[in-house]
Amino acid sequence: MQKLKTTGAKGDEAASGRVALMPRLCHSGGITREKACRTMPRSGIWIFLCAAILAPAAPAVAANLTIRVDNVSPAGGILRLGLYDQASYPNDEAKPIASADVPAVAGETVVTLRNIPPGTYAIQAFQDVNSNDKMDTSWVGLPLEPFGFSRDAVPFLSKPSFDEVKFTVLAGENSQLFHLQNSVRNNPADKARDTIRARQRK
C-alpha cells in the first residue's frame, strides 16, 4: 500500500488525518476538492455556534449591601432586618431574600448583606428590645418597639407601599441608610410632612 506523503509547514499540507484524507475525499463519491474546501469551514462555524449555545452562561455578579440603621434605642436587644423584593414585601409572613439578626448598638447599628442578586428591594426592620423574636404591639396593633423602613418611609395605618420603600441594588458594593421610628403616624398632615422629609433625605 502506498503511503500518503506529508510535507512540512509554510502552506503545505499538514500531517493531520483530516488533511491527509483530502485526496481520498476528492476521488470518492464525486466530491471535488473545491467543494470539500468550501464545506469544511462551514462545519467549523456550526461547531463553534453549538459550543457557544451549550456553554453555561456566566454567573451574574453578586452585590453586597451595607445598611446603616440610625436612631437605635439604648434599650438594647436585637435588631432584626429583612430584605424583600416586590413579590414578598406585601406578605408579612414571607421569607425575606436576605436577613440579619444582630445585637442592637445604641445610636447606629451597621448590617452588611452579602452575595445578593442585583435587583429592586425594600428593607423593613425592628428593634426587638426584649429579644422575644417578635414585634410587640398594642391591643389595636400599633408597634411598641422601634421599627423602620428603607428610604425612611413612614407608615400610615399600615406599612408603606413597596413604591415608597423600594431602592435599586447594583452589582458590587451598595449602601443604604434609614432611621428607626418609635410611633405610627395616624394624622394625614403628619404623613405628608414625613413623606416630604424622606424624599429630601434621598
Image (spheres, helix red, strand yellow):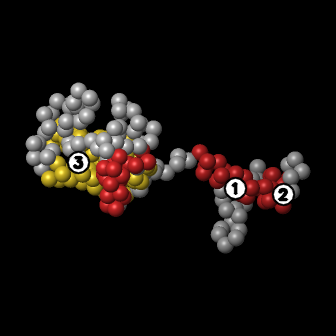
Residue at image x 84%, y 55%? 26
Task: Give neighbour class at mark 1: few <14, some 14-19, many 20+ (Cα, 10 Å).
Answer: few
Q: Residue furthest left?
A: 75
Which residue is disc 1 drawn over? 45
Name, please, the residue furthest toward the right: 30
SS at badge 1: helix
Q: Is residue 82 left or right of residue 138?
A: right
**Residue on which disc 3 sits:** 180
Residue at 86%, 52% (x, y): give it: 31
Which amino acid does the dot numbered 1 rest on? Ile
Which residue in the structure is indicated by mark 2? 35
Tell me what residue is drawn at x 33 percent, y 50 percent: 189
Near mark 2 (Cα within 10 A), the count class, few <14, some 14-19 or many ≥20, is: few
In this rendering, the answer to whether 185 lies above or below 27 is: above
Q: Amino acid at mark 2?
A: Lys
Of 21 and 160, which appears nearest the observer? 160
Vertical order, 185 against 174 (above or below): above
Residue at the image point whose x is 67% and y is 72% from the top: 10
Element type at marker 2? helix
